[in-house]
Image (cartoon, rainbow, N blue to C red):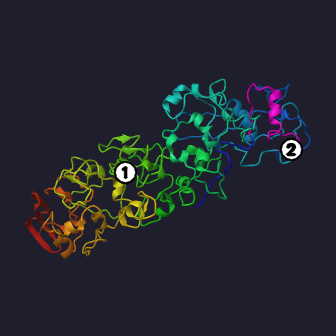
Amino acid sequence: MMFHLRIRASVLGLSCLAICAVGAPFALGQEKVTSTVHNLSAGGPGSVRSLGEGRVCVFCHTPHTAGSMTPLWNRASTVSAYQIYRSSTLDINPKQPTGSSKLCLSCHDGTIALGSVLSQSDRIRMSNGDYLRTGGMNLGTDLSDDHPVSFQYTSGLSAADRQLVSPVELPPETRLDNAGEMQCTTCHDAHDNSYGDFLVVNNSHGALCTICHRMDGWISSSHRNSTRTLTTSGFVEWPGRTVEASACGSCHRSHDSGRPERLLMFEEEEQNCLICHDGRGARTNIRDELGKRSGHDPRRYRGIHDAAETASGHADHVECSDCHNPHAVAEEQIGAQTGYAPIGRTLTRAKGTSSGGVALSQANFEYEVCLRCHGDAPVALRGRRTRQSDTSNLRLKFGTSSVSFHPLVSESRSSDTVSLKPGLSRGSLMRCTDCHNNDNGPRAGGQGPDGPHGSSYQSLLELNYTTTDYTLESSFEYALCYKCHRRSSILNNDSFKGHKQHIVDESTPCSACHDPHGVDTTQATESDHTHLINFDTVIVRPEVGSGRMEFKDLGRFRSSCSLSCHGHNHVSEEYE
């Protein structure tokens, strides 16, 4: 796996930015800058300095023969055309750099020699090369992987993007220029390196980033509050020792980001998560789950996901941020929650689709997160059973207008489910993850992470559920069913006279007759489809003669079937 990454220790930092604080007195500026790497004189402390020039300010300023740029600018203005940051979630259209940002770039785009000044015809010679070395301090002319600058930061912008603060709330340290534009100087002060990387404030715990960015849910999120130590790696340095201290810098880089859009650290979106969620940094080891037999493995997809996508507007894929909002996600309290919980803390402020098909900016129920991909624009799933009334749209299957359904969206209409285990009374609701979950997770009695990241069983199931015909019944083969339904009740025929005959004597799987999600009857069939009856058409065939494949509900614990199965022709065969 290749990482296209150029990273330094600071989230917003360049180790040397030629930034001029407009209007700053020269004396005060020189006093502060002398001990920094912006002192390019022969006596400067950095590795980039002149061979013999002893003046400090001359590399940027001159009292005479200055250019047109203020304050008394001593360098030629770069004429480069830059590639500018673009993003589908950006509410502005950044233009070419202007103002003080252009002054900074006269050194930091690598196109003008460091010693090339207007006040003298001959270039000041440098001891370590006339230009900044490629990478690091040299941004080049491709600014698509850098935080945008030279745009109007207005109240209209903050109103359009409610996660940006109003410009009137910005503190004096983070100044817009006289035109109301955000520039390099909003975050950097070229004369003062008190906070490192010439930042205008200490950025520990993301303090500089959150001056402008107020992400929904950030205050209570794990990524803001976790004290877990970040794992040292050979190809990345963290701004802080812990997740809490690194904050935004745990995932983002404001300069030379690995993935330009949204300034993510790594080009592969999921790698920004898995670098911690691999058992070394974060509490949960998600990486190991993704390689199991079935699961949501984002590593199979490249360049498909977009943060602004609609549920029906993109090709099938899965990325971590399809289900999790990284700015709001909080640690799940496994074991602390008793009874039904509509949605877990790890899904806080995740997008969703309602049971009515409405796109939601914030899901309130776990199933709404799932319906974004398994609803009206369902992903193609391998091994899906073909049913008599067939649809892959789970929103319709679980809908309250369906004939029968597992109680995900609302409680079941039927009072005939006498096999439920103690504590699962009529009216109980369930979540998708009660069935689709890690087979070694806490709800399965294991030590792995909770959630549908991966499972050793087909269809990302927490427990085994065999759908193969002629399967010998056992507590293992139908463990998922027996998680909620008492095996003794099923085999004692408490609710259906033929349960034991079908499952034990004839080795017919539960799935031959029952559709585990629900039955959408928008495709009309002659069957009643109560009690999740929706025949698997690979196992169950039409009745020889009439061609009927029909289940009839004749009342409580009474029914009849007309079909062909296991070589036996049922003609209105009744069970009571």
Residue 140 appears left or right of 207: right
The image quadrant where one finds the C terminus is bottom left
Circle 1: element type: helix
Q: Residue at x 48, y 59 (%)?
A: 300
The nearer-to-camera label among 1 and 2 is 1
Residue 489 point in image, percent of width and height: 20, 66
Residue 357 magenta-highlighted = no
Taking the view exactly as shown, the residue that stands out farthest to the right is: 52
Residue 500 appears left or right of 282: left
Circle 2: element type: loop
User: Counting residues from the N terminus, which is met first, the one under dot 1 or under dot 2?
Assistant: 2
Chain part drawn in magenta: 17-45
Q: Residue at x 52, y 34 (%)?
A: 91
The image quadrant where one finds the N terminus is bottom right
Which residue corresponds to mark 2? 126
Which residue corresponds to mark 1? 370
Disc 2 residue type (three-letter): Met
Residue 317 point in image, percent of width and height: 44, 54
Residue 292 appears left or right of 93: left
Disc 1 residue type (three-letter): Cys
Which of the 4 image quarters holds residue 213?
Answer: top right
Residue 459 point in image, percent of width and height: 36, 62
Q: Can residue 78 be seen in this view?
A: no
Q: Residue at x 83, y 32 (%)?
A: 31
Q: Residue at x 66, y 32 (%)?
A: 186
